[in-house]
Amino acid sequence: MGQFLTSGEAARLLGISKPTVARAVQRGLLRPALVTPGHHRRFLETDLLALRAQLLTSEDEGLELAGQPVAHAARHAAVAAPEAEPAVTVPE
């Protein structure tokens, strides 16, 4: 299993704000791997890297994650992503 990241770390990895991560979770676009007893979300690094890779290769430049263009945001996060099955829902 991969490393767990906080919402802030997930936001930095995806190149979006922490509130955007929270909105994406609320809208069902991003799913945390676990929620702590204190209601803090934790995301698997491998899931986030796979999401970023999926967003970078998406041909739909209009795709948004919680109101922010993700293709633009994902381009600013500069780590190569391994192949993995993401725990996310991306609208078609």
Image (cartoon, rainbow, N blue to C red):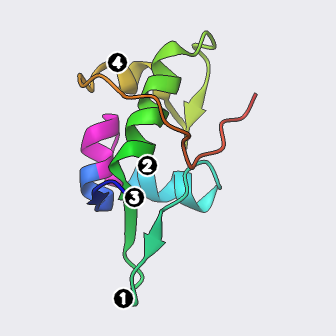
Residues at circles 1 and 2 in contact by the CB criterion of under 8 Å: no
Q: Residue furthest front?
A: 1
Q: Quadrant of the C terminus?
A: top right
Q: Residues within 10 Å of mark 3 (few under 14, many from 20)?
A: many
At horizontal 37% and vertical 26% (from top left) the residue drawn is 73
> Which residue lies under the disc numbered 1?
38
Q: Residue at x 57, y 16 (%)?
A: 58
Instruction: Please identify the quadrant where the N terminus is shown.
Output: bottom left
Q: Which residue is mark 3?
A: 43
Residue displayed at 61% across by 9% down? 59
Tags 3 and 2 touching, CB below 8 Å? no
- The kind of secondary structure element at disc 3 is strand
Query: On the image, numbered disc 2 is attached to which residue?
Result: 20
Counting residues from the start of the chain, the first of labels 4 and 3 encountered is: 3
Kindly indicate the quadrant of the structure image that contains residue 50. Answer: top left
Report the span colored magenta.
10-18
**Residue farthest along the top direction in this orientation:** 59
Give the amino acid type for the residue marked by disc 1 in the picture: Gly
Give the amino acid at mark 4.
Arg
Of 58 and 20, which appears nearest the observer? 58
Q: Which residue is mark 4?
A: 75
| Residue at disc 1, secondary structure | loop
* Magenta-drawn stretch contains 37: no
Label 4 and label 2: CA atoms lie apart by 16 Å
N-term mark: 4 or 2: 2
